[in-house]
Image: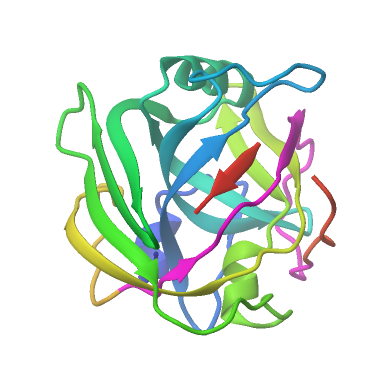
Amino acid sequence: MHWRVDAGALRKLVPDELELQEHDGSAWLGITPFLISGFRLRGTLPVPVVSSFPELNVRTYVTSEGKPGIWFFSLDTPSRLAVEAARRTYRLPYFHSRASLVRRGERVEFMSSRRDAERPFVLEAVYRPEGGALFEPQPGSLEHFLTERYCLYARDERGLHRAEIHHPPWELRPAEVELSLNTMQPDGLELEGDPLCHLAERQDVVIWPLECVKQAARPTSNRHLPGQRPRNREE
């Protein structure tokens, strides 16, 4: 799910080293529920139960040194192992939550509620394909801007970091969403109107270790990295 949001309000929530990207005259906030399966370190086998869990992320779109990527405001999952590992390894704002993802045919019921939070961070949604064939987003389109990103950014006391992400191009279809409750947006940001919704099936992904972004100068061009082959996930 993606909402148009005020770029000025969103800019205040993103590190100065990153350039906030806009498309179609707007900045965008994404709230994405999905299921991770087969999660594992390279060279190891997935462990039953431990390697599969629902997750929910809240993100926007940024660039540094000419590499468009993702900035995560939060990532929620019931897997304590994933929370601790991602916080330490990728400096990402992971949070422990109560969450479930239930499939009933094409209908998916998703719920996430963050544990021990100062305020409620909750998503309750039911989604399904709206119809239409799968399509691969084309360069220049809004769907391409929102999905075809091949790195993530993170920041800690040492500065800005980037991790490369490899996966095949996304295949999407329009989605119909019944949004019962949503309080996941960052503080200071208002969501108005209905979101733009897409559904994707399995996507094989490889995430590389973090590397320091030594010079985080704002670029003069927005260049997408090419898609590559590869964590299995369903959105």
Question: In this rendering, does residue 11 appear at all?
Answer: yes
- Front one among 78 and 234: 234
- Asked if residue 198 is among those painted magenta in the image, a careful observer would answer yes
Question: In this rendering, does residue 16 appear at all?
Answer: no
What residue appears at the point 60 percent right and 16 percent down from the top-left corner?
47
Instruction: Give the residues in magenta.
Output: 195-223
What residue appears at the point 55 percent right and 17 percent down from the top-left corner?
85
- Classify 38 as above or below 34: above
Q: Quadrant of residue 115?
A: top left
- Front one among 204 and 212: 204
Magenta segment, principal secondary structure? loop
- Front one among 188 and 142: 142
Q: Quadrant of residue 159?
A: top right
- Asked whether, in this view, residue 70 is left or right of residue 220, the answer is left
Q: Quadrant of the N terminus?
A: bottom left
- Asked if residue 29 is among those painted magenta in the image, a careful observer would answer no
What residue appears at the point 34 percent right and 42 percent down from the top-left corner?
101
- Asked whether, in this view, residue 120 is left or right of residue 16, the answer is left
- Asked whether, in this view, residue 128 is left or right of residue 61, the answer is left
Number of numbered discs on residues = 0
What residue appears at the point 27 percent right and 48 percent down from the top-left corner?
184
Residue 19, horizontal then vertical, whole percent:
61, 58
- Classify 216 as above or below 190: above
Residue 5, horizontal then vertical, whole percent:
36, 69
Residue 205, horizontal then vertical, whole percent:
71, 43
User: In the displayed image of the protein, which residue is found farthest to the front?
Assistant: 105
- Classify 167 as above or below 157: below
Residue 105, horizontal then vertical, whole percent:
38, 59
